[in-house]
């Protein structure tokens, strides 16, 4: 039903009972436009400075990301070399163990034979040798063979021990490199995420700067019309066109319609009617509800679901709605100024005292908290 209402009044409100501007009001509009343009310029400068700072951060993060990438490459190269060394050592150990297993039976047999000779080996050699001159040579030969076998076994044992120590060292180095690689990957990912976040902020700033430039353009056009009206008044020219400032450039700088606290947010509702297109501001009964922007009264009366309702048309399909009023202080077709009383706070549909407030821009409901001044 409220949508049908806007379809009826969107084109007619500003044409109804338009009043010629007076000098005091026009000068006030000129001052307000100038002040808002200055605020928009300060915001543009702040956004530009913030963007420059973010761009510097992005450059630093890119350098950091490249350093982390190089560090990761180095760690991975070290890890590959260590793995190759470990594989080579393991292969040598396997070959040595295989050779040891192959030689073990022969060595064991010789050691058993030598053991069997025992302390009487010289006597047996003497009895088995017909030539006494060969006795010493035979004794030395047996001793040399036994020493060779013992040396070979000891050499195998030492080599295996050294390889095991080398293998353990390589595994420890491998574990250290795995830890270093994990740390490098984590740092690289963190730098990448930070760079993405900064780029997202830069895109958001670009969007806000574009919007700021658009709003400033709209306001400058309105300011030019105001200045033209002032020139006409100065030359006593008859002025029939109503001058007004658009609502959109004042986003974030619109005064609250009533002194109170937020009781219900935009899009939330405690009823079965669905999401709310406005907000509810808790305030004392009888508190003055005031216009948030210059406009023409498009509706002033009782409306189903809104109680006593006032709708102000601010031009360019922008409206403000004031519902649940105890009384109405304006009439349809009358131009009101920002801060002018439109009615008094009454009980809301929930039973508590408060004001229902809604903003529509380009004919669509918007969150008023994004347009009202921060407090």
Image (cartoon, helix red, strand yellow):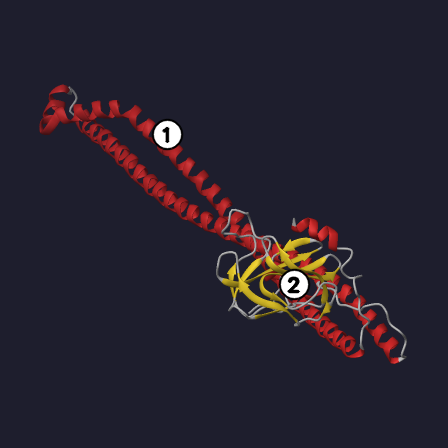
Q: Does the rendering let one see residue 120? A: yes
Q: Which residue is drawn at 71% across and 65% down?
A: 249
The answer to which of 12 and 252 lies nearer the viewer is: 12
The answer to which of 127 and 54 lies nearer the viewer is: 54
Q: Which residue is drawn at 9% across and 29% down?
A: 119
The residue under label 1 is 95
Residue 62 image point, x, y percent:
60, 56
Q: How packed is label 2: few (under 14 Cα within 10 Å), some, or many (20 or more)? A: many
The residue under label 2 is 51
Residue 289 image point, x, y percent:
60, 68
Q: Does the rendering let one see residue 257? A: no
Residue 5 placement, left or right of 189: right
Q: In which quarter of the image is residue 223?
A: bottom right
Label disc, if present, on residue 277 of the rendered structure: none
Considering the image in quadrants, where does the C terminus appear? bottom right
Q: Which residue is drawn at 68% across and 66% down?
A: 250
C-alpha distance separating marks 1 and 2: 65 Å
The answer to which of 241 and 86 lies nearer the viewer is: 241
């Amino acid at each position: 039903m409220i949508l049908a209402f806007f379809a009826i009044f969107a084109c007619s409100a500003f044409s109804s009972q338009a009043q010629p501007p007076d000098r005091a009001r026009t000068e006030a509009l000129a001052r307000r436009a100038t002040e808002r343009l200055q605020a928009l310029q300060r915001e543009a400068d702040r956004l530009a400075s913030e963007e420059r700072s973010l761009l510097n951060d992005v450059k630093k993060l890119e350098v950091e990301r490249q350093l982390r990438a190089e560090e990761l490459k180095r760690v991975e190269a070290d890890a590959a070399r260590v793995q190759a060394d470990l594989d080579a050592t393991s292969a040598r150990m396997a070959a040595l163990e295989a050779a040891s297993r192959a030689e073990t039976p022969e060595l064991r047999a010789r050691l058993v034979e030598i053991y069997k000779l025992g302390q009487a080996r010289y006597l047996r050699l003497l009895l088995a040798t017909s030539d006494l001159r060969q006795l010493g040579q035979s004794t030395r030969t047996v001793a040399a063979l036994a020493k060779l076998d013992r040396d070979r076994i000891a050499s195998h044992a030492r080599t295996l021990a050294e390889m095991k120590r080398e293998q353990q060292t390589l595994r420890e180095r491998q574990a250290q490199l795995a830890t270093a690689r994990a740390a490098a990957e984590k740092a690289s990912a963190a730098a990448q995420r930070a760079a993405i976040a900064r780029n997202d902020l830069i895109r958001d700033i670009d969007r806000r700067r574009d919007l700021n430039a658009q709003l400033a353009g709209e306001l400058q056009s309105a300011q030019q019309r105001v200045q033209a009206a002032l020139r006409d008044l100065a030359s006593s020219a008859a002025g029939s066109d109503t001058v007004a400032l658009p609502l959109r450039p004042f986003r974030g700088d619109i005064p609250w319609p009533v002194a109170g606290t937020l009781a219900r947010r935009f899009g939330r509702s405690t009823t079965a009617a669905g999401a709310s297109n406005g907000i509810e501001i808790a305030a004392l009964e009888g508190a003055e509800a005031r216009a948030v922007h210059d406009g023409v009264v498009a509706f002033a009366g009782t409306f189903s679901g809104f109680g006593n309702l006032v709708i102000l048309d601010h031009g360019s399909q922008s409206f403000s709605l004031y519902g649940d009023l105890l009384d109405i202080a304006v009439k349809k077709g009358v131009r009101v100024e920002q801060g002018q009383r439109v009615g008094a706070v009454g009980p809301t549909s929930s039973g508590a005292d408060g004001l229902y407030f809604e903003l529509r821009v380009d004919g669509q409901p918007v969150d008023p908290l994004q347009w009202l001044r921060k407090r």
